[in-house]
Image (tube, helix red, strand yellow):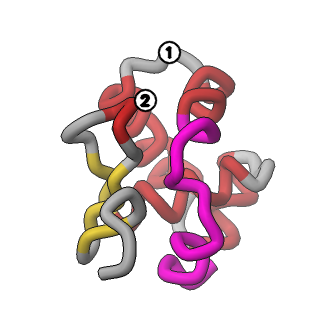
Amino acid sequence: MSNKSTQSQDAYYLGKKFRNIYLTRQEARCMICLLRGSSIKLAAHALGLSARTVEYYVNNIKKKLRCRTKAELIGAVIETPFFSEENIKSLDL
C-alpha cells in the first residue's frame, strides 16, 4: 500500500475532508468516469453495467458525501486526492 489517501484493498479513501468515508471499488470506478466527464449512460457502457446500476452507485456516493446533485458531487470529489493517476490505474480504467 503506497498512500493512505488513495486506497486500502477495495476501499478508496477520499482524504481528510471526508474522514472515515470510503468508496467501494464499483463506486470508485463510477466516480472516475464522472470525473472524466462521462454521463451516466457513457459510464455504464464503459464499465459494462446498466445505467440504472451506475445511477445506484452515484446515489450511494451522493448520500455518503451529503451532496444533492451530480455537479455538487464532482466538485466535492475533485478537491480530494482520490482523483489520481494511481487510483485510475488500480481501477482498470
> Could you say which is closer to the camera, residue 1 or residue 90?
1
Residue 5: x %, y % from top left: 38, 57
Tell me which residue sits at (50%, 15%) in the image. Answer: 68
Instruction: Please say if the residues under marks 2 and 1 sit with CB atoms less than 8 Å apart.
Output: yes
Tell me which residue sits at (45%, 54%) in the image. Answer: 53
Name the amino acid type tagged 1: Arg
Please tell me whether residue 70 is drawn above or below residue 51 in the rendered image: above
- SS class of the residue under badge 1? loop
> Could you say which is closer to the camera, residue 28 or residue 45?
28
Name the amino acid type tagged 2: Lys
| Image quarter hosting the N terminus | bottom left
Give me the C-alpha separation between circle 2 and circle 1.
Answer: 6 Å
Tell me which residue sits at (64%, 72%) in the image. Answer: 85
| Image quarter hosting the C terminus | bottom right
Q: Is residue 79 left or right of residue 37?
A: left
Q: Is residue 61 left or right of residue 85?
A: left
Residue 81 forms part of the magenta stretch: yes
Q: Which of the labelled discs sits on residue 68, or is there none?
A: 1
Q: Which of the labelled discs sits on residue 58, or is there none?
A: none
Residue farthest to the right?
37
Q: Is residue 57 left or right of residue 8?
A: right
Q: Which of the labelled discs sits on residue 62, or is there none?
A: 2
Quadrant of res 75: top right
Query: How would you rate the neighbour count of disc 2 (Cα within 10 Å): few for under 14, some for 14-19, many for 20 or more?
Result: some
Residue 60: x %, y % from top left: 35, 38
Residue 68 forms part of the magenta stretch: no
Tell me which residue sits at (31%, 63%) in the image. Answer: 4
**Total labels drawn:** 2
Magenta region, residue range = 77-93
Query: Of callouts 2 and 1, which one flags the residue occurring earlier in the amino acid sequence?
Result: 2
Residue 24: x %, y % from top left: 31, 59
